[in-house]
Amino acid sequence: MRLLVTGGAGFIGSNFIRFLFRLHPDYRVLNLDKLTYAGNLANLSEAETSPNYSFQKGDICDAGLVERLMRTGIDAVVHFAAESHVDRSIAGARAFIETNVLGTYTLLDAARRLKIPRFVHVSTDEVYGSMAPGESATEQTPLAPNSPYGSSKAASDLVVRSFWKTFQFPAIITRASNNYGPHQFPEKLIPLMITNALEGKKLPVYGDGMNERDWIYVEDHCRAIDRVLHDGRPGEIYNIGSGKPSPNLEIVRRLLQILGKSDDLIEFVADRPGHDRRYALATGKITSELGWEPEVDLATGLVKTVEWYRDHSDWVQKAKSGEYREYYDRFYVNRGTSLSQI
Ligand code: NAD
Ligand code: DAU
């Protein structure tokens, strides 16, 4: 298979590319990424040595570029590229609307015209909004996003839906819960807490710390996307999660325990505006149709994640200082476009 992966330099996209090459070493991947603050090519240093991997720096909103890339002969698009951080969307949502909505439309429009036979749109449980205690969102639960980020993802899901309903364009939507694991930018809860604790800094917990998230280890998410890519039904939506929500405070305390640090590092800070209280997903559909279930339990995943951040202080230091952004200039500029490789 020849895949166009968007946003492959980010957290989940880079984990997915590494996972894919382990599972299908003969597949070819063209990674289109704008390299925003969240795109880090050091995440892909292993893949770069493969003749089956190419990178193109660019914006998914650039219709000309998107069409040119899709004309190189693509069997499927796996679309991760997005602005992904809720707090940033509260500070300003323009980039979220542009990339998440217009960018997704730009990809769909080209893929439909060029008859790309498969398109996986990677979305989020955040589109369902907050769940009441004891409740879980199924794929039929009405969309009720509360953050500007969530609303931009819900809007993109609706554009994807309309391309299936109107044009029978064979797109599939996945909606995953909160991911954690190696290579996550240290602005999200788990890597922020681990790296702050390692540096002896305070751990800022929003509100009362009792908001719940349904955590899934990133490799389990990648395995689910691979299952959907190969055997998912066009026009369908698949939830991907652990089905076991945990309060933030419990997560933070578990991390401190693994790190051997004191709970005194916890600092309760002002709540996030519009903060969703609880995310919880029902995942029976992907289990019964595609045989997928999470394999990494929370206790194991948290230990693995702490170990990765502890062993990769260089990656963390470069991510926090911004030095990682020099990677592209050193490795790609002056090497010309990598398109010819695919
Ligand atoms: P991320 O922020 O780590 O990475 C996003 C990537 O997209 C970066 O490499 C960035 O450079 C790239 N990008 C941003 N704008 C672009 C543009 N206009 N053109 C091309 N590339 C662009 O995000 P992530 O956490 O890896 O999330 C990936 C996808 O999964 C997103 O669509 C997100 O909504 C979804 N998702 C994330 C989670 C989670 O917990 N992180 C959970 C469910 C779904
Ligand atoms: O549910 C899936 C979504 O999960 C993805 O679609 C998003 O891309 C991803 O960013 C994530 O959104 P959240 O807002 O849930 O993740 P975040 O890591 O920002 O926050 C997790 C919880 O921790 C949330 O309740 C807010 C809280 N939090 C977060 C930060 C950054 C804190 O208490 N303190 C913090 O400093």
Image (spheres, rainbow, N blue to C red):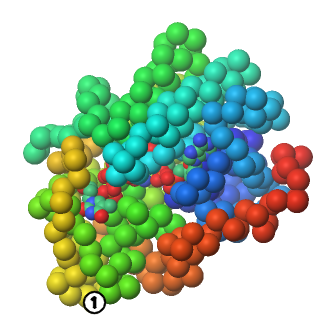
Residue drawn 46% across and 37% down? 94
Residue drawn 42% across and 73% down? 305
- Compared to residue 218, the image places residue 281 above or below, namely above
Return the residue nearer the eye: 23 or 171. Answer: 171
**Amino acid type, label 1:** Gly
> How far across and down, in percent of the image, does residue 28 sit?
76, 48
> How far across and down, in percent of the image, does residue 121 sit?
52, 35
Return the residue nearer the eye: 11 or 116. Answer: 11
Return the residue nearer the eye: 196 or 130. Answer: 196
Residue drawn 61% across and 62% down? 40
Neighbor class of circle 1 (other Cα within 10 Å; few <14, some 14-19, many 20+) is: few
Left or right placement of residue 65 versus residue 209 in this view: right
Left or right placement of residue 304 versus residue 257 in this view: right
Q: Which residue is mark 1?
A: 260
* Element under disc 1: loop
- Compared to residue 202, the image places residue 244 above or below, namely above
Q: How many marks?
A: 1
> How far across and down, in percent of the image, does residue 142 sit?
26, 25
Left or right placement of residue 34 versus residue 332 in this view: left
Residue drawn 43% across and 23% down? 158
Left or right placement of residue 339 versus residue 218 in this view: right
Return the residue nearer the eye: 11 or 187. Answer: 187
- Compared to residue 251, the image places residue 271 above or below, namely above
Q: Is residue 160 among what the camera can see?
A: yes
